[in-house]
Image (cartoon, rainbow, N blue to C red):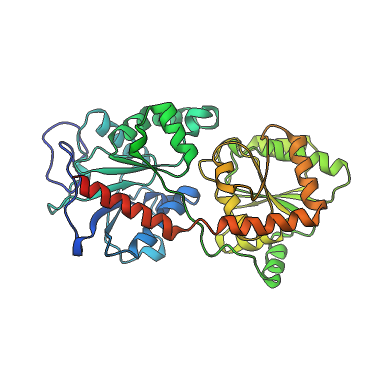
Amino acid sequence: MQDGCNGPPQPALLGGGKRRASSPGKGGAVPLLLDIGPAVHQGAGLARYAEQLALHLRRLPEEVDLELFYNAHSGHGLPAGLQGVPVRSLSRGQVAWRLSVLASQLFRRPLRSLAAVGTRPRLYHATEHLLPYLRTPAVLTVHDLIFERYPEHHTRRNVWFLKVGMRLFTRAAAAIVAVSQHTRRDLIALYKTPPDKIWVIHEGIDPLFQPASAVEVARVRAHYRLESPYLLMVGTLEPRKNHRTALHALAQLRAQGAPHQLVIAGGKGWLFEPIRQQVDELGLADAVVFTGYVPAADLPALYTAAECLLLPSLYEGFGFPALEAMACATPVICSNAGSLPEIVGAAALQVSPLESAELAGAIRQVVSQPELSAQLRRLGREQAAAFSWERCAAQTAALYRQLEGAG
């Protein structure tokens, strides 16, 4: 049966109409349907958030009666660590699914494809920016509003969808998880979201990220053919990551005799080709290494061996690479924009994302001053230790409990 926005609401765990709180689950745990879609289809920050939240909620059976949901448009399956968790899925093209979710909110009608056998309602948690119209209360995680602040860094189709959809999704959600205070401020400023509806719950960091052994560093250096001292950037290659400023800073350093390479680790994203062109225009073809996608197992050694991590982003909703690098005792130089000042605190050097000379100066400080480098390594590990997925899951479970009690 096709999804529709006409006709009476269907009996469902999820549906449309009057909202009501979820009923108690096993042993009093809150019945939850968690959208695990990002972890099934993606490989970036949203995927990590959805997977880690699910894994750690699974460890709280007395708090959360967990069930997973995803639209199986990519042909991929659940991450290995989530095998055995009850799961519901549907198979619908990605575009068709997104548009049907948007239509369900516009017309305030349920999606028939989300109807389920059984009558017990479940709280629904949308872990990405996609929330269907529901009968049960819903939590929406908002990672960033970059499409509002920097629409030129998205495709026009995606900007249109998000500008229309996010206003509906944020209004429809019973509660919103903002991954940073910066995202919370954007929600209030741009959408007039009531402050008491927003919970700021920081994301966590995987214990995988810690200083790597000399053997592991040697292996990763050899694998990626990294012989020179290097600076590191990690993340999907897209305009907001601001490779432009980093490349201009590198050109200045190389002109002054610095031997450093810039290693750019991450898959190709939106508008990747201009980055390649700029490398050639600046004469940096021999000084820049594009690794492509790097498996998580290689990242700690890649961080550990770097002189410093550069994150001159124009906008970050959270900033995983900064935390990961700090956990690996790698000095961090980041921009003073978006959520980054909130995430790194006093444990990193902060620069204007638009000033390549300022970034080059900060790099010179770190690579030429052992005392400063050592201080940043120590402070970084202390800062990173404050972020954990256990805490994220516990705070999110507390939010679920509050919504259940409010019903």
Please report the residue visible at 32 percent of the width from the left and 53 percent of the height from the top. 398
**Which quadrant of the figure contains the N terminus?**
top left
Residue 292, percent from left and from top: 62, 51
Q: Measuring 32% from the left and 55% from the top, which residue is drawn there?
A: 397
Which image quarter holds the C terminus?
A: top left
- With 42 as the anchor, is 276 left or right in this view? right
How far across and down, in percent of the image, does residue 234 sit?
A: 62, 49
Residue at horizontal 39 percent and vertical 30 percent from the top = 161
- Kindly indicate the quadrant of the structure image that contains residue 237: top right
Outermost residue toward the bottom in this view: 215
Quadrant of the rendered image containing residue 93: top left
Horizontal side, residue 111 vs residue 95: left or right: left
Which of the two residues, 122 or 236, is positioned nearer the viewer here? Answer: 122
Note whether residue 92 is visible.
Answer: yes
Residue 356: % across, % down: 74, 35
Q: Position of residue 203 (x, y in %)?
A: 46, 51
Q: Nearer the viewer, residue 17 or 176?
A: 176
Can residue 160 be seen in the rendering of this structure? no
Q: Is residue 214 above or below residue 381?
A: below
- How many numbered marks are there? 0
Left or right side of 253 for 163 = left
Using residue 30 as the reference point, say whether residue 60 is left or right of it. right
